[in-house]
Amino acid sequence: MTTQIIRNELIQLGATVSEKTFAIKAAGELLAKAGRIAPAYIDSLLRRETVANTFLGHGVAIPHGMIEDRHLINETGIAILQVPEGVEWNPGQRVHLVIAIAAQSDEHIALLRRLTRLLQDEARLSELFTTADPYALISALDDSAAAPAAPQTAAIDLSLSLSWQMNYPNGLHARPARVWTEQARRFAATLQVRNGNEVADAKNLIGLLQIGAEFGHELHFSADGPDAAAALDALLATANQLTAQEVADAEAARKAAANAKRQHWQAPGKVLALRGISASPGLVIGQARVMKPQAIQVPDIPATLGYDGDLLENALQATREQLQTLAADTSRRLGKTEGNIFLAQAELLSDTDLITLTCQLMVEGHGVAWAWHEAVQRLADRLAALGNPLLAARATDLRDVGRRVLARLAPDLNLLDNSKTQGNNEVLIANDLAPSDTATLDPRQTLALVTAQGGPTSHTAILARTLDLPAVVAAGAAVLDIQDGATLIVDGDSGTIYLNASDEDLASAKQWQQAQRDKQQQAASAAQQPAVTADGARRIEVAANVNRPEQVAAALQAGAEGVGLMRTEFLFLERDDAPDEEEQYQTYRGMLTALDGKPLVIRTLDIGGDKQVPYLNLPHEENPFLGVRGVRLLLRRPDLLLPQLRALYRAASHGPLSIMFPMVSTLAEVKALRAQCEQVRVALNAPVVPLGIMVEVPAAATMADRLAEHVDFFSVGTNDLTQYVLAIDRQHPELAAEADSLHPAVLRLIAQTVAGADAHGRWVGVCGGMAGDPLGAAILTGLGVTELSMSPRDIPGAKASIRAANLAELQQLAQRALNCDSAAEVRALTGATA
C-alpha cells in the first residue's frame, strides 16, 4: 500500500518557502526525520537539481537523489511539501506540491504513472494545493505503489555489510546481474553493491552494470531494513551459486577462442581483405546481404497522459511476455545460457531510471513513443560511453529491447517487419546485430555473420558460436559498403573477410572446407571407437558429465559410453522450492530412457561451498567449503535425502543406475548412508544398486582401503580434491591458476585411492576436469583408473590420448609424473608417449 510509502508524518501542509533549495531541504528533512533516509541524502536531492530538471509540470516537482547515493536510503519513502502560495522552481515554473522521492528500486514507478494522470485533473490538483487534510494527498496517490515497502517493525539502526571478491571471469555482466536483481527484489530491505566509489541499488539492473565490477574486484554488499540479514545472506548465496556456471562459460569461451587461433586458411592470391575480430570460428563462401543502419524517426504525437501511460504499461507487459517466450524457445533450441540472454533483456524493462525518464519526457508534453525512444537512446549512449566492451554490448541489448517496446507503441514504423526473408548461402552484414535477430536466424540459410561494431563477448557472438555460425565482429564501417550479393570468403578463425576472390582463391577455400569436414568426420568416427591402449591391454570406459535427459543424445554422439556423473543439484537451483520425489523420479527415469541401457551414475545433492540454495535457509558460514556441504548436509536434512533416495530407487528398475555420494570424509558417514539406502530400498522393494562415493577430500583418499570395504566404487572429483590438497581456493583470482590437478601431490592421492580400491576389487573413476585433459587421461590410465567421465566435447581428445600408447608406456608416464616436483614438470611430460 502507498500508505506505507507516503505516511502522515511525511506530509507538511501550508509551508511557506522563498526558494526551491529551501523547499527541497524541507521535503528531505521530512524523509530524514521519519528515518527513511540518512541526512546526507538531502545533499543528493540538491545535487540532482544541478544535472536534471525535476519539474513535472502543472505545479508539481519530484526532486529525487543521485543513483550513486541510494545507499543513503534506509527505506523507500515519499515526502510531500505543500506550498499553497507556490515557489519558483525555474523561470516560468511555479510549484505547489514538492514530492520528494527516496526510492530503493522501482517501488515509485506506479506513483509516477498516477501523477501523470493526476496532472490532467486540474480541479483536483487545485484542491490538493490548498487542502488542510493530509489524507486527501494520500488518497490521491493511494494506488501508486508497485511493491510494498517494509512492514513497520522495529527499525534497524546499523547497516549490515560484508565483502565479496568478484570471481566471475567476465565480471558482472547482464546474465548474472539479472539473477542478482531478482533475488534482491524478494526483500523489502535496501540492498546496495559498492565497487570502490561506485554504488548501485541491487534491485536495479542498469545500476549494477554501471559499477564496473570486474574479476578480482572487492565488492561490498550492504543492507538496511527489517529483513536486512536475510537479504544479505540471500544475495551472497546467489552470487556464489552463479560462480561455477560463470567459470564454466568462461572456460568454454576460452577454448572457443583457442580453437579460433588454430591454423587458418591462406588465400593463394592477392585478395582484398577486411580484418576484424574472430567471434566464432569456421570458413564459408557466401553472398553478401548488407543490412544498412537506418535511423529511426519517431513522430512526437502527444495524447492524454492517462492514455499514453496505459499504452506504455501495456507495451512493457506485452514485451516482457514476448521475451519470456523467446527465452523459452531459445533455451529449448540452443541451451539455457543462451535463453537467459532474453530474460536479462526483460529485466531492463523494469529499470527505474528508464521508466522515470520516460515519464518525465511525457509530462513535458512529448508523446509516449517519442519519450520511450529518447529515454532508451540516452541510457544506451551513457552505457556505450563508459569505455567498457561488456557495457557497450549491454547498450546493444538495451536498444534491442527498446525497439521491441517501440514497435508496440508505434506499429506504423514496422520495426519488427521481417518481410525481407532470408535467402540461401547468405553472409549477413550489419553495423551490429541484436541478440534477438541472431537467435532467430536459420543456419541452413545464413552461413556467417559480419558486423562493423560489436565484440567477441557480446550476446550476438555467444549465439553465433552456439549456432555454429562463423562470425567476424568489429570489422569497421567499410563492411557496410560491400555490395549486396557480392561473393565473400569469411574466415572466422582469423577474423578476416575476403572480397573479389579469384577462381583460384575460391577453389582453395573449397578444398580447405572439405579438408576440415574430413577431419571432423574422422574425429567423430574415432570418438565412437572404444578407448583401448595401443597394445589392447587396457580398455578405459569413457563417460560424459550430463545433467539433463535432453543432453544425453549429444553426449552419445560425441562418443560417450554412458553418464559417469549426473549432478542432481541442477534440479534444486534457480527455483523457489525443492523438487518433490515425483519430479526427481521422472527426471532420473528420463535419463535412463535416453541412455537406452548404458550405465548412469547419479550423484546425490551436493549443496554448499560455491553452490547455495537460498530457499533451504542454510546458515551463513564464514568458510562454506569447510562447512556443512555434501553428505554432511544430507545426513542433517532427511527432508532432502529421503525423497531423493526414494526417487532414485524407484528409477533403478528402468536401467543400470548407480548412486554416488559427494564429499564423504569418514567411515561413519558411509555406514549411515548405506543404512538409509537399505531402509528405503526394502520399503520400496527396489533392486540393489551399486553405491559409491566421491573422493574429493584427502581423508577419503588416505582411507580408501578401509572405505572400499563398504562401497562399490570410487569416483575422484579432481577439482575439489586439488583445492583441498593444495589449500587453494580454485576460484581465487590470484591463486586459481596454481590449483592444477596435475600437481604430483594430487596424483599421489589418486594412486593411493586406486591401491586401496584394488585391495577389495573396486573400480575407480575420475569425473573432474583432469579426466578431459588428454595428458591427464593418459596419466590416469597409467595410474590404474578404469573409468573417465568428462564434458562431451573433451571425449574425442581423451580417447585419442589413450589409444596413442601401450599400457606399459602409460604406466611409465604415470610413474614419472609421481616423481615430479611440480605440476609444471608434469605438464612438461606432454608428448612423452608419442
Image (cartoon, grey):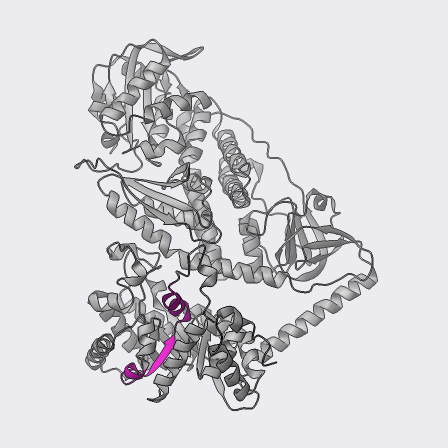
Q: Is residue 1 magenta?
A: no
Q: Is residue 711 magenta?
A: yes
Quadrant holding the C terminus: bottom right
Quadrant holding the N terminus: top left
Point out residue 255 in the picture as x, y percentages from the top left corner.
Answer: 55, 63
Relative height, residue 446 to residue 350 (above, below): below
**Residue 7 occupies which quadrant of the picture?**
top left
Point out residue 256 in the picture as x, y percentages from the top left corner.
Answer: 57, 61
Q: Residue furthest left?
A: 154
Relative height, residue 212 to residue 616 (above, below): above
Point out residue 510 in the picture as x, y percentages from the top left corner.
Answer: 74, 66
Between 769 and 351, the residue placed more toward the observer is 769
Between 26 and 560, the residue placed more toward the observer is 26
Q: From the viewer's perspective, is 286 left or right of 649?
A: right
Point out residue 195 in the picture as x, y percentages from the top left corner.
Answer: 41, 41
Visible residue check, residue 311:
no
Q: From the viewer's perspective, is 478 left or right of 173?
A: right
Q: How many marks?
A: 0
User: What are the residue bounds of the magenta stretch?
Assistant: 705-727
**Residue 359 occupies which quadrant of the picture?**
top left
Between 597 and 783, the residue placed more toward the observer is 783
